[in-house]
Image: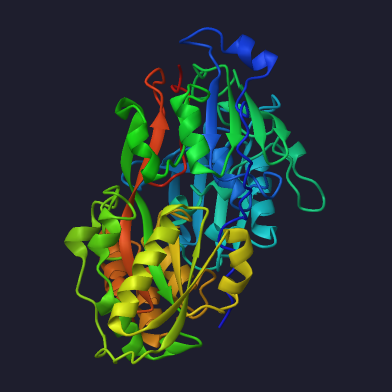
Amino acid sequence: MRTPRRLIAGLFVLPLLSGCFASSGDDAKASSGSGDGARLRVALPFAPTENYSPYGQDAMLLSRLGVTEGLTKLDANGTAVPALAESWSNENGGRSWLFTLRDARFQDGETVTAEAVAAALTAAGKADPAPSALSGVKLTAAAEDDRRVRVSTAEADPVLPLRLSNPSLAVFAPKAYAKKGTVNVVGTATGPFALAKADGDTAATLNRFDDYWGGRAQASGVTARFVSDGTARANALRTGDVDIAESLPVAQVAALDQDDVHEVDTARNTSLYLNTKSGAFTDAGLRAAAREAIDTSVIAKGAYEGYAVPAQGLFGPALTWAAAKRVEPTGRVRATRPDGERITLAAYSDRPELPETAQVLQQQLRKAGFEVELEVRTYARLEGDLLGGRFDAAVFSRNMMLDTGDPVTVLASDYTCDGSNNLSFLCDRNVDRLVADAQAESDTTQRQDAAMKAEAAVLGTDAVIPLVHQKLVAGIATSVRGALPDPYERTLIGTGTRR
């Protein structure tokens, strides 16, 4: 079984310093007015850790800040809709797709051509490691003419337009690509805001791109600061030092003006992943005992203070189709008495609700008869041991639609024998068969039906115990209009975002 690839980038913790959000002279001058033209000040929880490489988690930062875009994007229902491509068609039995480009320019002034798009997608396909959206996919791209690009895969891929919506497959100008595989994203993307300056992993300056194909942005730019401490982000919003504070800890919400608090259902779950490869939870009966011991309503009300709902499965209420299609888990075995079985439960502290969730789980599992040792670290310090399978169980937060917007793709990456993000180290022939059946479906409705059958098989192994479906809690000052928090965590700032 393959070891899971790196799941999220390490997180940088900034010290709590007074004045850390103070504007520079240029920022203050640009922000002196209100309405059209004022700069936006944003506090984000996760710092860039790969020099803004589009092939890792930094791609999500660039997407949320309105810097990058690809051929397609996801709408509120998780459907692929036009972005740089204005239309597309399926050819050759699903192994080839022809995308027609809209008239657009790169931020360096060059025209977006089919040749440039093909080169960008080819570079993404050659990246090492490959972007998660391309896991298991061999992609080629070639210009058909100036405005049409043909994208092909070795095997039929019915969800390629969804796959190409991933921020890691954003398109950059030809000059962005270096011979060694690095990408210089400063002033080379296509979004409404251009990255102008990066201050390491502490801050970034973005300026409006006036020739954006979707219209001139109403804000003149964005000043982004990366602050992993949730209390610091909330305080900065409360004192007016920032206009938008992303991902607020629920414990800080009560201290804010409620008009500044915005919540939205997301595709993000918090789940308990049980190590099926080594340790106590190789025993399916003990996994069943752990599941029966857990009361998810206590976690939703306590650790998340109502900003989450008890999980009904892997796919939550943000995916409006899931509830009606869900089927009962299959293949579960009878629970085995723990009788003092010793387990190690891990959680990371960068998301403040996770340690509290782990403490609740520790109490519930102890009551059921497990001896539970708790390991809480920052993700950067936890990751190596987590991916190495050194814990019996781990509390982890995962956006189920982040990679492609396709439920089948996340099932394949997280729960199959060769899955690249398989935290439970699950290898079950029935799960693999049902996921493969779902991957073969091209009709959207039938693909969703097949995905829910595969979900039932995954849950039947008790390799993962879904705990809660999370809500995104963002702090947005009442002076701000047009912010774009979304269930897929890909957007935040757009052309209409202003103050």
Colouring style: rainbow
Q: Quadrant of the C terminus?
A: top left
- Residue 357's spot in the image, x, y percent? 38, 62
Total tally of numbered discs in the picture: 0
Tell me if residue 496 comes above or below residue 330 in the rendering: above
| Left or right side of 277 for 117 | right
Residue occupying the point 37% across, 44% down = 251
- Residue 417's spot in the image, x, y percent? 49, 81
The residue lying toward the viewer, choosing from 262 and 426, is 262
Residue occupying the point 52% across, 78% down = 391
The residue lying toward the viewer, choosing from 381 and 172, is 381
Tell me if residue 114 comes above or below residue 49 in the rendering: above
Q: Kindly give the residue lying farthest to the right in the view shown.
A: 179
The residue lying toward the viewer, choosing from 207 and 375, is 375
| Left or right side of 365 for 13 | right
| Left or right side of 327 for 489 | right
- Residue 268's spot in the image, x, y percent? 38, 54
> Can residue 316 be spotted in the picture?
no
- Residue 151's spot in the image, x, y percent? 56, 53
Q: Quadrant of the N terminus?
A: bottom right
| Quarter assignment of residue 128 | bottom right
Residue occupying the point 53% across, 30% down = 42
Tell me if residue 195 comes above or below residue 9 in the rendering: above
Tell me if residue 62 comes above or below residue 54 in the rendering: above
> Can residue 209 be spotted in the picture?
yes
The residue lying toward the viewer, choosing from 467 and 217, is 467
